[in-house]
Image (tube, rainbow, N blue to C red):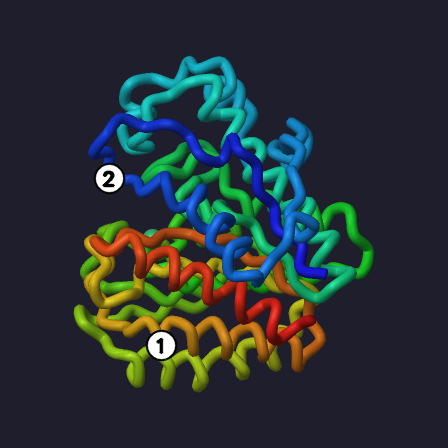
Amino acid sequence: MLKIAFDNDYVYPLEKNHRFPMVKYELIPEQLLREGTCTDENFFIPKMVSDDHVLLTHEKSYFSRLCELSLSKKEQRPIGFPMSKKLVTREKKIVGGTIECCNFSMSYGVSMNIAGGTHHAFHNRGEAFCMLNDQAVAANVLINEINSVNKVLIIDLDVHQGNGTASIFNDKEKVFTLSFHGKNNYPFRKEESDFDLEFEDNANDSMYLGNLKKHLPQIIQKFEPDFIFYLSGVDVLSNDKLGKLGLSLEGCKERDNYVLRLCKENNIPVQISMGGGYSSNLRDIIDAHANTFRLAQEIFF
Ligand SMILES: [Zn+2]
C-alpha cells in the first residue's frame, strides 16, 4: 500500500501574503482523497524525529538552539519563517515522517511525505525555509541502523540546488548526491554534489528529460544504491514564480514517471519528499504534486 506521511501540524499558519505556499499541504491530501487516488488508510501520522537521529546529521549546539528558540537573529534571518515551538515541532514531524517512510518503502517499494525536501538545511545552520534536512537525516539513519543499506542515492530534482544535502555528504562515500537545478537561481553560491547539472533559464521538457534519461540510469548502474531518496519539487514548472525553468505540467509528470519506473525496474526502494512549488497558479502546484502521488499508485500498486 502507498503510505503517506501527513499531519495537521504540517500546515503552519503564516501571515497573509507570506511567499511560502503553506496551503498546499492542506489541499494536496484533500485533492488525493476527493479524486480517489488515496483513502484515509494511505495516510499515517508521523512521530517526531528523536534527538539521536537528528544528531547523526546536525550539529548538537545548532539543534539545541533551534529547539530552545535561541538561534541568533543572524541565524534566523536566512530561514525565512518566524520561529516558534510549533514550527520546530512541525519540522521534527516532517523529518520523523521521512524516516518512517523508509520502512514503508522497504516493504512496498515506495512511500511519500507530504512536505519535506528540506534540502537547504546544512549540518549547523538552516536557510530558505529549511531547518533540519529530512532526507539527509533519514539517509544517515538507514546507513547506521539498517544492515541491508550500505549505499544511498539522493535524486534532487527540485529546481533549487540541494546545497545543504551536498555539503552534508561532501566527503561521505556511502551517499551519492545528484542535483538538477537552475543555474541562475538561488542558491547563488552552489555547493558541490557528486553530480550537478545546471540548466539555463527556460530550459524546456526535451532538454530536461533528455539529460535525465541520459545520466540517471548510468549513475544508478555505476553506484548501485540500496535505497533512493527522491526530492520531487515542482518548482521546475514554467509558470513558477521562483524557478526560471520552462517545464510543462506534462514534462514534470514525465520526469516523475521516469524516476519512479527506474526505481521499480531496478528494485530499489524509494522515498519521496515533495519539495518546492511556487507557481502563481495554485491549481498547477496541486496538480503537479498530485501527479507524483498518482504515478506512485499507478506504478507500484
Ligand atoms: Zn525549490
Number of numbered callouts drawn: 2
Residue 142 as seen in the image, left or right of residue 275: right
- Residue 208, percent from left and from top: 33, 78
Which element type, helix, strand or loop, lies under badge 1? helix
Residue 32 as seen in the image, left or right of residue 43: left
Residue 189 as seen in the image, left or right of residue 98: left
- Picture quadrant of residue 254: bottom left
In the foreground, 173 or 118 = 118
Say which label, 2 or 1, has the lower sequence index.
2
| Residue 20 marker | none
Within 10 Å of disc 2 (Cα), the crowding (few <14, some 14-19, many 20+) is few
- Residue 103, percent from left and from top: 74, 52
Q: Name the residue under label 1.
A: 250
Which element type, helix, strand or loop, lies under badge 2? loop
Residue 154 as seen in the image, left or right of residue 212: right
Regarding residue 61, the answer to whether it shows in the image is yes
Q: Mark 2 points at which residue?
A: 19
